[in-house]
Image: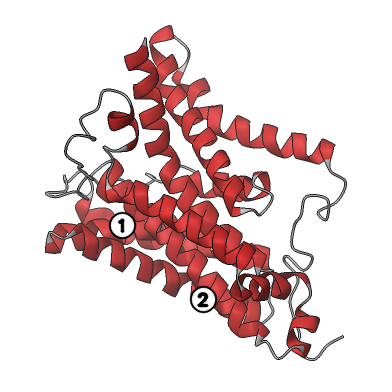
Amino acid sequence: MLDIIVSVLTRTIIAGTPLLLATLGEIVTERAGILNLGMEGLMASGAVTAFIVTFTTGSPWLGLAAAILVGMLLSSIHGFVCIGLRANQVVSGLALTMLGLGISGLWGKPYIGRPLPVRMPRLSIPGISDGPVLGKMLFNHDWYVYLSVLIGILIWFLVKNTRLGITLRSVGENPQAAEAQGISVNKVKYLAVMSGGGLAGMAGAFLSTAYSGSWNEGMVAGRGWIVIALTIFSLWQPAMAFLGAYLFGGIFVMQYMLQPLGISPNILSMLPYISTLLVLFIYGLSASGKRRMNAPATLGEPYVRGER
């Protein structure tokens, strides 16, 4: 029984890692007042880029760097459309999703079904990683898992306890006041959007170079849309993102745990999305308006410099 519990918790951490990375990225982006619905496309682009670079160079670290770069470049397009042109953020985000999925399908076509010769290495601590419980559960993962935790702690600290975090939050809450204090609102928004895109690319890189070790079109499997819900679930708080990501990671794991019971695979594949709708439904009943949910006041609204 203990082995089963350890196995489930271990796989929950693994399954929750890409959700955590992408959710942290979306929190940073939305804290600056920009809604990015393109996470699915950004994750797919990051996944195919990381796979191709790793497959070609034999270095998963170069694959990770390339995925982050591609995520930042694609998200900068969204930033330009929403910040520079002040276009509708929902439409731009959906277009970014279609662009990312199209790019990933085109670039990845020659690599479908080809195994990756080398994956991201695992952290190995002599005398600890071999432990029967905590060793297997916490100290026997690839570097993405530990990087995601470190990044989460860093973002939490920056948002809560530093001037940089105050600047980010003020831009999302009251950009006019931030501008009056000499803050370059558009610069902060661009940096937030690109940072969020880089984390989404990193989440995709995990899927192809650590989680599966292969590239298949559609491997993101709707995780980008779940990230949008997890951002709301976390109340735009990086600390809460850990809970949401690992909770939904456990739901993904339950799909495979319940298969031997004879439950329809179609029903099991619906579990993450049913859970997403349930979370949004509960939030809709328990909170009246986005302010009670702690959403940034200007989320999704274009900012015009000098306008009061």
Measure the alpha-carbon separation of dots 2 and 1: 19 Å
Query: Percent position (x, y) of residue 189?
Result: 61, 77
Neighbour class for label 2 at 10 Å: few (<14), some, many (≥20)? some
Q: Residue at x 58, y 34 (%)?
A: 273
Residue pictured at 59% horizontal, 84% vertical:
187
Label 1, secondary structure: give it. Answer: helix
- Residue type, label 2: Ile
Residue 50 in the image: above or below residue 227:
below
Image quadrant in which you'd find residue 91: bottom right
Q: Position of residue 228 (x, y in %)?
A: 60, 50
**Residue located beneath label 1 in the image:** 48
Q: Is residue 15 above or below residue 36?
A: above
Q: Position of residue 84 (x, y in %)?
A: 63, 84
* Amino acid type shown at disc 1: Val
- Left or right side of 242 for 10: left
Q: Where residue 197 sits in the image (x, y, percent)?
A: 48, 65
Q: What residue is shown at x 49% (from left), y 45% (from top)? A: 223
Q: Are marks 2 and 1 in contact (CB under 8 Å)?
A: no
Q: Residue furthest front?
A: 127
Residue under pointer 2: 77
Q: Which color scheme did the rendering employ for the protein?
A: secondary structure
